Amino acid sequence: IAGITQAPTSQILAAGRRMTLRCTQDMRHNAMYWYRQDLGLGLRLIHYSNTAGTTGKGEVPDGYSVSRANTDDFPLTLASAVPSQTSVYFCASSESGGSGANVLTFGAGSRLTVL
Amino acid sequence: GESVGLHLPTLSVQEGDNSIINCAYSNSASDYFIWYKQESGKGPQFIIDIRSNMDKRQGQRVTVLLNKTVKHLSLQIAATQPGDSAVYFCAENMDSNYQLIWGAGTKLIIKP
């Protein structure tokens, strides 16, 4: 089934540890995104990538890094996790970023708890 | 900064009735609006979208209305079913901007 695969589904992590959330899409979409979702705050964009080899900062990029070595994969890394990064993380993709129709396809999410 | 907001955080509707979920936006430069549905434990799922040059767009059991004069967007769901229970998000996208601006969401509850 075409779509986005995120891993892990859930993770409990000690503060200060490094963590990478994986995201893979098989739709050959050019653009990919990482959002975090916190109750009452909706979805907030962390980082995005318009096409393989390029990345950009979203609304809340601090403490996170991404890479886009190829079209399919867009991992999100927390270099040194802090409790405020406890959240549900969603990876998404779209055929292209930018103007016009920008329908996003989302993964099922990764629930991260930082203690 | 610009923001997209919802009028009601929770909406309770009788099964079979029509549901109307409202959204206010503040950026008149936004040219594209989208509604997503998020069921519990899942990622958001695209429902319907509308460009700023349109006032209305219909899908299967859903209609989106755009009133640019008062910067208001609404999602109408006809004959609401138990499977419509979810949180509904509106989002706006300004031209040449890769970022969607999301509302906080409205939880739709279906009463049997």
Image (cartoon, coloured by chain):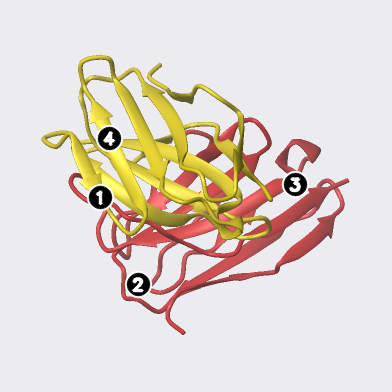
Chain colours: A red, B yellow
Amino acid type of disc 2? Thr
User: Is disc 2 in the same subunit as disc 1?
Assistant: no
Query: In this rendering, does residue A46 appear at all?
Result: yes
Residue at horizontal 45%, vertical 35%? B20
Q: Is residue A95 above or below residue A44?
A: below
Task: Tell me which corner region of the image, top left, top right, bottom left or bottom right, holds residue B25.
Answer: top left
Question: Real-space Cα distance between discs 3 and 1?
Answer: 44 Å
**What chain does mark 3 sit on?**
A
Query: Among all residues in the image, which is located at the extreme left?
Result: B53
Disc assigned to residue B58: 1
Side of A20 relative to A5 (left or right): right
Amino acid type of disc 3? Ala
Amino acid type of disc 4? Leu
Question: Real-space Cα distance between discs 2 and 4?
Answer: 35 Å
Side of A42 relative to B63 (left or right): right
Q: Nearer the viewer, mark 2 or mark 3?
A: 2
Residue at horizontal 45%, vertical 74%? A3
Disc assigned to residue A71: 2
Disc assigned to residue A8: none
